[in-house]
Amino acid sequence: MEALRDTFGLGIGKMRLHLVSREAPVGELVRGRIELDLDRVVEADRLTVAVIAMQRVVGVDFVRRGAPLSTRKLPVVKREIELEADAIYRSGGYDFAIEVPVVNWGKPMGLPEGLAEVVGIVSAITTPVRFPLEWFVEGRLHRTWKIDLKERVGITVEGAD
């Protein structure tokens, strides 16, 4: 069992993500600290923190035997910064400040009136339902060929829509 833990890098410790505030407007900084509580010294590629916007999408998948509903959670935008590069990590803390990115939605194309009506009908049938964005701050200790140590905390972002 110990060999399996070493192979995949399981059970090395914990990561805690502390934020000064869980609310931030778009374009402003989210400040916080990543605390590593490691059971032993760990070799890793890098330590990063990211602000991620995800969107739940429900749509119809047209397949051979019908059209079942599918649900996916897709990343919309991600801003990531590196706190520490390739190093030997020990228990301790790392302060960070990362900007909440702006979400640039594509602008609709101008279509002739008749074609716009047809596109509207087809898109009403095939376009997936998109839920509001879900925002997270994620800390991650990246380790090649091993399971990453990570922590994700939800945040509220003002002015993202």
Image: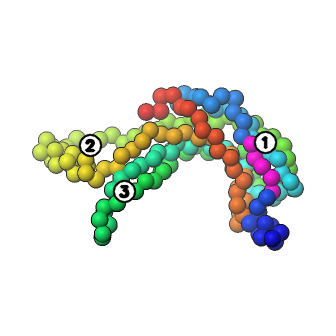
Q: Earlier in the sequence, mark 2 or mark 1?
A: 1
Residue located at (50% from left, 45% from top): 54
Judging depth in this view, the residue of 118 and 58 nearest the camera is: 58
For mark 1, give the secondary structure: strand
Residue type beneath disc 2: Met
Give the residue at mark 3. Answer: 69
Looking at the rendering, in which quadrant would you find the C terminus? Answer: top left
Residue density around tag 1, few if under 14, some if 14–19, many if 20 or more, within 10 Å:
some
Q: Earlier in the sequence, mark 3 or mark 2?
A: 3
- Image: magenta residue range: 12-16
Residue located at (72% from left, 59% from top): 143
Residue located at (40% from left, 56% from top): 70
Does 61 sit left or right of 88 as displayed?
Answer: left
Cα–Cα gap, marks 3 and 2: 27 Å
Q: Is residue 19 visible?
A: yes
Q: Earlier in the sequence, mark 3 or mark 1?
A: 1
- Looking at the rendered structure, which numbered label has been put on residue 13? none
